Image (tube, rainbow, N blue to C red):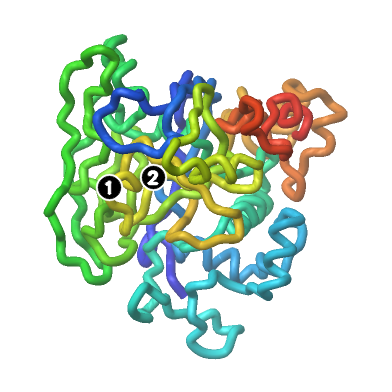
Amino acid sequence: MPKPGADFPHNPLIPVRGARVSLGKPRNFPSFGWDNEYGRRDVDVQDFRASRFKITNGEFLAFVRAGGYGQRRHWSADGWGWRTFRNAKWPTFWVPDGPAGLHRYRLRLLFDCVDMQWDWPVDCNYHEAAAFCSWLAEREGQQVGYRLVTEAEHVLMRDDEDRPDYWMMVGKGQVQQGQNGACTNGKAANGAANGNGAATNDAATAQDNDAPSMATPNAQRYNLHLVHGSSSPVTDCPPTRHGFHDVFGNSWEWAEDHFAAFPGFRAHPYYEDFSAPCFAGLHQMILGGSFISTGQLASKFARYQFRPHFFQHATFRVVQTAVAGVEAERGGEKERAVLERVYGREAAAAFTPERPCVPFFETSCMDAAEPYVGDRPCCSKRERRTAR
């Protein structure tokens, strides 16, 4: 069996300080964009913690071996419906290599089936990602639950020049340089580097509210633009200055946000049904692009979505909203006392590792303007605040 620290990296949670994030692409930015990228929405992000790496095949194996696919309590109603319909017992692109009880697998890629790459990001759908988060919180005895990242949290994990609101930060003198370095060109399949057309992150000065950096993150620092013909080890590419790997590229990242319009949205006159049919609370956002993303799909402004049961070279990382005092008093009665102080004794009494507290977190889909609003709890601040 693969071993953490040897076959795949340990994956600690890194704290991130909350801030206000401005989402949306300036209409005068000199690159192509789909209609859903434009407009502007400000989101107040609370302090949170997120895993340094995207979840690897090696980490996900523990969920499979523990019988996570058969434990109803870890799945949403829709997720359990998908799992039972498909009779899923392991990720779709894992290929059993012997009796099921041995948990030996190979990995199906675009054009080949190879030995399992335990340090690559697991390829899964949203339902599987959410079930893993539930299972992990229970296994670790967490009373504050795990979840997936939000669109605004993802922005705070990036280097400043790769944020959609970079031009605003330049104007306020808030810019910090990112990390240097390039991908190490490790074990990715078909891994000859392709430097043709790689964009740079050279910043210019802000003029007339133009964003002063390139739309596409530097391909030398991320597994984008078909630099590789597959995913790659999560340790291959350098981290952002905040310590996170693969915020762009390698695999798309499932988010908690439903796909929704920003204030000021206007449907594209030549492709009116590209975005609008998906503003119904039924499509989960995916962020950051994958190894096969090129052009606009690899843009720092890109906003894409799929139904939660779809597969799209997508993975996830684990996120946990910070609750003041819990980090210092994690575990046992002290943690319980903090939760009672924050939520009240009656509410806190219901929080257990089997049903942990999930503090409020704001998503970009909340309270979208009519008619671009869904009917799921995610789409309303009021409903989210009452659905702990």
- In the current view of this chain or complex, which residue is farthest to the left? 196
Q: Which residue is mark 1?
A: 295
Which residue is situated farthest in the top direction here?
172
Element class at badge 1: helix
- Residue holding disc 2: 288
Residue 227 falls in which quadrant of the image? bottom left
Pick the residue in front: 303 or 102: 303
Compared across the picture, whether 307 is left or right of 234 comes to: right
- What's the mark number on residue 7? none
Label whose residue precedes the other's in the sequence (1 or 2): 2
- Asked if residue 151 is positioned above or below residue 73 in the image, the reply reads above
- Location of residue 86 in the rendering, given as x and y in whole percent from the top left corner: 66, 73
Tell me: 263 left or right of 244. Answer: right
Identify which residue is drawn at 21% across, 14% down.
207
Q: Residue at x 62, y 35 (%)?
A: 330
The amino acid at mark 1 is: Gly
**In terms of image quadrants, where is residue 261?**
top right
Can residue 9 be seen here? yes
Q: In whole angstroms, how far apart are the C-alphas of marks 1 and 2?
A: 12 Å
Q: Is residue 218 above or below residue 384?
A: below
Nearer the camera: disc 1 or disc 2: 1
Residue 16 sits in which quadrant?
top left
Residue furthest bottom as drawn: 98
